[in-house]
Image (cartoon, helix red, strand yellow):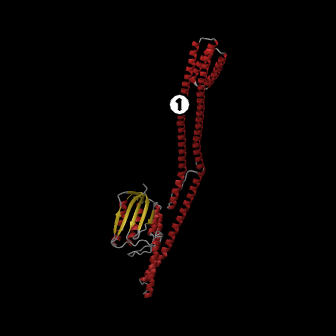
């Protein structure tokens, strides 16, 4: 089964379902046709039986009339009429006999015996007193035949209903079996086809999170397994490109830091006037050089920090983490920083435990809290909270600062981007803090975004609940 393709598997599954349900439908149609045919035959037989018994009763009246007339008048014409009516009645009896109605068989035999006795009596000119009981017996047999015919029709109807009920139950069982078979085929198709699709989805998520250490293996249809091999080739290629990028970044940073260190030392010697005294204009130039050297050094260090964060993001260590303790630890790390600005950090969290990478989550919250402290006005409040909503852990950091300008909201998480709003207190930053936050949050399968509001900045981090 693993050798067929996704399309072939779908066609095979649908063909099996159609065969099961179609077979049940055809069987149902055949049963209905048989029951309809049986009901039609039973109705026709009942109509013939009723009509024949009614005709036999009418012929019996004619036989009795012609027999009485013959006995009274002794006219050969009435005897001919008697014989004619008797022959017609016997033909009706023979027709009733062919209907194979078992309850009528003894009565029909008795009717023939009475008819034969009546004919013999007229041939032998027996007294009328002996003929009259025979005529009465014939009329009585007609009544019994009518009752027996009615019972036979009721029995046939009852038998048809029982047969209908039996076939209904049997047909219901077949339909239930067909539906169960179709359901099993559908479940098998779902398991066989959805499972590799889920593997592909998980593999794509890992690739999007830059997790290239785990090989991609997809089972199932041949075309999906081939797609899994292509994705694994893409994983290896991306891993090589990522390694090349990190290696090039390290080499470039190292090559820049070496001459930068010498340049920094040279500028420091000039500023300390070791080679000789500096004029006012020369000192101003040296100060500009020193400022730019320090800025360049910070840029290189930020670049290395961002590269290290991207590398660490691929190494998750999920473990039970007490959320209130996590937020308290982050607040304690920034206690001196917040006290210098006379800020109050309000923590809102329950005592719940979550499956998280505590170290990376600490770095995320620390960067958000550091920015909030820098941009908050003195004597203000910063709210740091966590809540559980629809299978997600939502971490929020809200300050009372100037917020993020509307034109900066779309690119605030890009590397080396600093917003246009100025912090109330002097701060040093290269604009990689929020980029690091985004890298770490993505590695944990979550999202980070800025909630629009009129005043202050409201950052929200959502991490899937792994429990």
Give the quadrant of residue 358: bottom left
Q: Is residue 75 left or right of residue 455?
A: right
In which quadrant of the rendered image does the C terminus lie? bottom left
Percent across and percent down for residue 17 are 57, 45
Q: Is residue 347 left or right of residue 451?
A: left
Residue 75 image offset from top left, x and y in percent: 65, 15
Looking at the image, the residue that sits furthest to the bottom is 279
Q: Nearer the viewer, residue 125 or 396?
A: 125
Q: Position of residue 220 (x, y in %)?
A: 56, 50
Helix, strand or loop status at disc 1: helix
Q: Nearer the viewer, residue 165 or 203?
A: 165
For residue 300, above or below residue 283: above
Q: Nearer the viewer, residue 235 or 31?
A: 31
Badge 1: how crowded within 10 Å, few (<14), some, or many (20+)?
A: few
Does the image show residue 119?
no
Whether residue 128 is visible to the viewer of this picture, yes or no, is yes
Q: How many marks?
A: 1
| Viewer-side residue, 338 vs 166 | 166
Q: Which residue bears the numbered disc 1? A: 158
Residue at the limit of the structure toward the front, as seen here: 73
Q: Position of residue 173 (x, y in %)?
A: 53, 38
Q: Quadrant of residue 117?
A: top right
């Amino acid at each position: 089964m693993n050798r067929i393709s996704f399309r072939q598997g779908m066609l095979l599954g649908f063909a099996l379902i159609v065969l099961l349900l179609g077979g049940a439908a055809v069987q149902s149609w055949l049963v209905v046709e048989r029951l309809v045919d049986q009901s039609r035959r039973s109705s026709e037989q009942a109509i013939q039986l009723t009509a024949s018994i009614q005709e036999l009763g009418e012929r019996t009246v004619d036989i009795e009339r012609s027999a009485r007339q013959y006995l009274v008048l002794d006219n050969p014409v009435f005897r001919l009429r008697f014989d004619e009516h008797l022959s017609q009645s016997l033909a009706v009896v023979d027709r009733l006999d062919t209907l194979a109605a078992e309850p009528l068989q003894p009565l029909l035999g008795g009717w023939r015996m009475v008819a034969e006795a009546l004919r013999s009596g007229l041939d032998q000119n027996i007294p009328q007193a002996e003929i009259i009981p025979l005529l009465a017996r014939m009329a009585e047999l007609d009544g019994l035949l009518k009752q027996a015919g009615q019972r036979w029709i009721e029995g046939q109807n009852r038998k048809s209903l029982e047969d209908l009920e039996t076939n209904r139950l049997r047909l219901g069982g077949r339909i239930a079996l067909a539906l169960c078979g179709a359901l099993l085929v559908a479940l098998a198709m779902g398991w066989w086809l959805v499972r590799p699709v889920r593997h592909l989805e998980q593999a794509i998520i890992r690739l999007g999170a830059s997790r290239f250490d785990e090989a991609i293996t997809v089972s199932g249809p041949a075309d999906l397994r081939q797609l899994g091999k292509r994705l694994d080739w893409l994983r290896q290629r991306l891993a090589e490109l990522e390694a090349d990028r990190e290696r090039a970044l390290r080499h470039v940073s190292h090559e820049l830091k070496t001459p930068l260190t010498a340049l920094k030392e040279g500028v420091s010697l000039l500023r300390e006037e070791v080679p000789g005294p500096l004029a006012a204009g020369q000192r101003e130039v040296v100060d500009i050089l020193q400022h730019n050297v320090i800025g360049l050094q910070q840029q290189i260090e930020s670049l290395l920090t961002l590269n290290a964060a991207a590398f660490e993001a691929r190494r998750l260590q999920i473990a039970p983490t007490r959320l209130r303790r996590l937020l308290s630890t982050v607040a304690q790390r920034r206690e001196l920083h917040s006290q210098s600005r006379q800020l109050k950090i309000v923590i809102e969290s329950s005592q719940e435990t979550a499956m998280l990478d505590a170290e990376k989550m600490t770095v995320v919250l620390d960067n958000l809290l550091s920015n909030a402290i820098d941009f908050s006005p003195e004597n203000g409040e910063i709210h740091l909270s966590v809540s559980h909503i629809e299978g997600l852990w939502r971490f929020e950091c809200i300050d009372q600062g100037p917020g993020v300008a509307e034109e900066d909201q779309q690119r605030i998480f890009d590397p080396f981007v600093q917003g246009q709003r100025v912090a109330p207190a002097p701060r040093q930053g290269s604009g990689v803090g929020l980029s690091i936050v985004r890298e770490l949050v993505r590695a944990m399968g979550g999202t980070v975004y800025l909630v629009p509001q009129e005043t202050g900045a409201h950052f929200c981090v959502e991490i899937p609940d792994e429990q």
